[in-house]
Image (cartoon, rainbow, N blue to C red):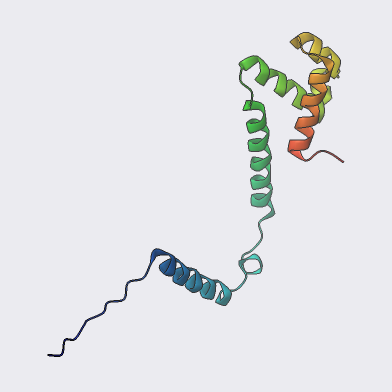
Amino acid sequence: MKTSKHITEKTSPATARDTETNNATKTNADAPDSFFAEPFDPVQEGREQGFEVIRHLLIWMADAPTLEKRGLRATVALHCVRPNLINGVTLESIGDKAGCTRQSIHKLARDFRDNMGLTL
């Protein structure tokens, strides 16, 4: 007696994912480069960059455990970016008013400059 087996192919999740990736690659390779195809709007690009800077700044300032430390971070950020807005107050006097050491304030200012990409 001869039996016939019906074999169904099952694809593993990895195989299905590889197939989808290959299809997406073919689709992306055939599509024109959208950088040159879409018109450039300098106003929109400027807004997006400005929003990104503000988001990054707010995240850095909010990354402190207490409201007082967040205020200290905001003051240090102002000192680094626009010291004239806080009447040119030095980091040392900011530290004195906040009850922090000179070293901790300078470390915070260095951290701000590093995070914002303001280091030379």
Q: Residue furthest front?
A: 1
Residue that appears at 77% across and 25% down: 108
Indicate whether 88 appears above or below 63.
above
Q: Quadrant of the C terminus?
A: top right
From this view, report whether residue 119 is shown above or below residue 75: below
Q: Is residue 89 visible?
A: no
* Residue 103: percent from left, percent from top: 83, 19
Quadrant position of residue 5: bottom left
State the image coordinates of residue 85 (x, y, percent, origin top left).
79, 22
Residue at 69 percent of width and 54 percent of height: 42
Q: Report the front residue among 22 and 73.
A: 22
Q: Is residue 108 left or right of residue 21?
A: right
Q: Nearer the viewer, residue 74 or 16?
A: 16
Whether residue 71 is visible to the viewer of this picture, yes or no, is yes
From the image, which quarter does the N terminus lie in? bottom left
**For residue 35, which quarter of the picture?**
bottom right
| Residue at screen point 51% across, 74% down | 27
- Image x and y of residue 75, in percent: 74, 21
Query: Seen in the image, is 93 located left or right of residue 39?
Result: right
